[in-house]
Amino acid sequence: MAEQFDVIVVGAGMAGNAAAYTLAKGGLKVLQIERGETPGSKNVQGAILYADAIEKIIPDFRDDAPLERHLIEQRVWVMDDTSYVGTHYRSEEFNKPPYNRYTIIRVHFDQWFNKKAREAGALTICETTVTELLIEEGKVVGVRTDRQGGEVRADAVILADGANSRLAVKAGFQPEIKPENVALAVKEIHFLPQEVIESRFNIGEEEGVAIEMAGTISAGMMGTGFLYTNKESITLGVGCMISDFKEQKVTPYDLLDRMKAHPSIAPLIAGSEMKEYAAHLIPEGGYNAIPQVYGDGWMIAGDAGQFVNGLHREGSNLAMTTGMLAAQTLIELKAANKPFTAANLAAYKAKLDDSFVMKDLKKYRRLPEVFHHNKHFFTLYPELLSKAAQTLIRVDGVDKKTKEKEIRKSFIASRSIFGLIGDAFKFWRAVE
């Protein structure tokens, strides 16, 4: 492993593969190091793929990528223990190619993506852990791995090693991640015949549905649930902040079982066979938690940089975009024969700031703190909304004006008029 590379990419997830592919296509000598047995082996769960992001990297990805279903319907459920108040959006516009969003199985997609990177010229080695960065005179000059004679040198290193980047912390590039800034999501894949899935969700062949959920399913913690349809399986899961898991002393497994038993979810997975289970860390700190993402000879991309839009549940598109932008920065500097110094790599931050990634994260920068300090958004309000909907819909001889007055009184009694106004203002400020 004495060979010198232009760039070493640590990680073979969305950000790492995007970076490795872009670098190799740009003519740079790239080594990609993955600790799993194969790319994606630690990502068994399903996910949503955003076509716009991957299209910018591999325009013809639809020709052979392992895609499950294209999404034509989005549902959002605000839930209490026995019901939900929700919105659906379904459009034939999303049923016209080129499709905008797909469900995928990460283990299959990551392997395909990495194969594209290798075909472009990247060298990938798996079952190898990077134990530390090589730093000389303040500049990253390579990595040390757990292999014999495992020092590898490069002009730059891109860290795309996930939400808990031990390498960045060990090198002093970012602080230890705070428990209130990272969620632990637990996911299962439930297998059902294709025709059963299509019947239950009222969809045609290759069409898909995504359901995002919030409310009492998170047991008083800051968190959300989700359900995605694949060809012959359903991905469902729930995630909450690690700080809340510690405080509430609830296990992720108990939370997932609670979610699966909900009367609105249980019928959707009835008769299924659960074959795959995974736990995954998701950065939820938002804009204010983003660390320094570049320095002398190093860059950070994907979850390692806290690039996740929690409100819109977007992560893979931010990961691919940041990986691509990091790679493009290095390609441009190499072409201009400029060294990979911190001053020159500042161009990466400029690209990020000019992209939707930082613009969206900055827009919602207040939201994590609002939710963290106001858990009643996940408990009280879902219950009040459910009771209000039930009161209005139930026909029981009570006139509508009286019912509306009862609903107003229940909201004020539960939160006070000033509390309601304050919550509305805080939420509006966080999303406006």
Image (cartoon, rainbow, N blue to C red):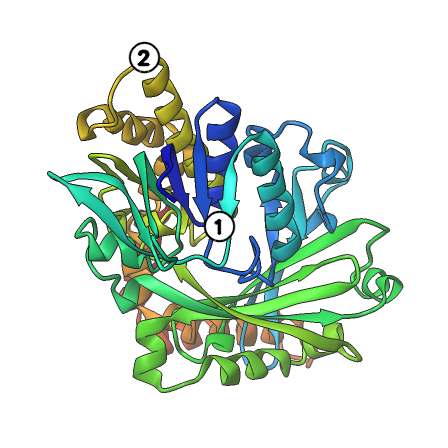
In the current view of this chain or complex, which residue is farthest to the right? 195
Residue 427 visible, this orientation: yes
Q: Secondary structure at mark 1?
A: loop
Q: Is residue 119 above or below residue 379?
A: above
Asked whether the beta carbons under mark 1 and mark 2 sit within 8 Å of each other, the answer is no
Name above or below for residue 234 compared with residue 295: below
> Residue 112: x and y, percent?
65, 45
Q: Amino acid at mark 2?
A: Ala
Q: Return the residue nearer the eye: 141 or 318.
A: 141
Answer with the quarter of the image where residue 272 lies. bottom right
Find disc 1 in the rendering and name its residue: 312
> Which residue matches tag 2?
336
Q: Amino acid at mark 1?
A: His
Residue placed most toward the observer, 230 or 136: 136
For residue 373, say whether it is visible. no
**First reached walking from the N terminus: tag 1 or tag 2:** 1
- Element under label 2? loop
Q: Is residue 79 left or right of residue 393?
A: left
| Mark closer to the observer (1, 2) | 2
State whether residue 174 is above or below residue 240. Answer: above
Quadrant of the image for the N terminus? top left
Which quadrant, please, contains the C terminus?
top left
In this rendered view, identify the residue nearer to me: 431 or 140.
140
Kindly indicate the quadrant of the structure image that contains residue 267: bottom right
Along the line of sight, the residue nearer the viewer: 317 or 89 = 317
